[in-house]
Image: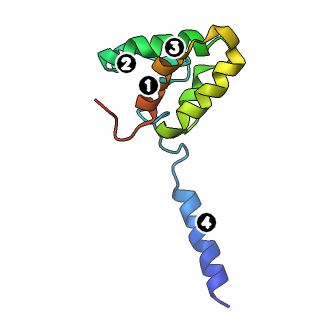
Amino acid sequence: MTTLPFAATALAALLIHADPEPAKVPVGRHGLYDEATDGIELSSLPLEQRPRYELFAEKCKRCHSLGRSLLSGKRPEDWRQYARRMMKMAGKGLSEDDAFEIIDFLEYYSSWPPRK
């Protein structure tokens, strides 16, 4: 069996020549999330999404990091059901109107290609 030593040699060669630091993949669908600040630079968002993001940041940061939502990998269609659960958990701290604004932002953020 000569394939096993060949495979081991090929794997070793790949590991030797691999980058010591893998390429950084943008975090979040748009690469907008900044882990250091646990947020998004407002100027990187379209004007109509900025107030929605600010509402999201204000309301959601009360219970968890923004990264928890922004890095969740949820699809746009997942956010409505998730937000309903959050409304129950937040009690009176999250109105239905606020929830719809937050959902709109999260659907925007997680959509691909990004909506304009």
Please give the label number shown on residue 49. 2
- The N terminus, quarter of image: bottom right
In the picture of the structure, the residue carrying the numbered disc 4 is: 12
Residue at coordinates 47% horizontally, 37% vertically from top-left? 76
Please give the label number shown on residue 104. 1
Under mark 1, the amino acid is Asp
Label 1–label 2 contact, CB within 8 A? yes
x%, y% of residue 6? 60, 80
Give the mark, 4 or 1, whose residue is nearer the N terminus: 4
Q: Secondary structure at mark 3?
A: helix
The 10 Å Cα crowd at callout 1, few under 14, some 14 to 19, many 20 or more, is some
x%, y% of residue 45? 35, 20
Under mark 4, the amino acid is Ala
Taking the image as shown, residue 3 lies to the left or right of residue 98, namely right
- The C terminus, quarter of image: top left
Q: CA distance from mark 4 to mark 2?
A: 48 Å
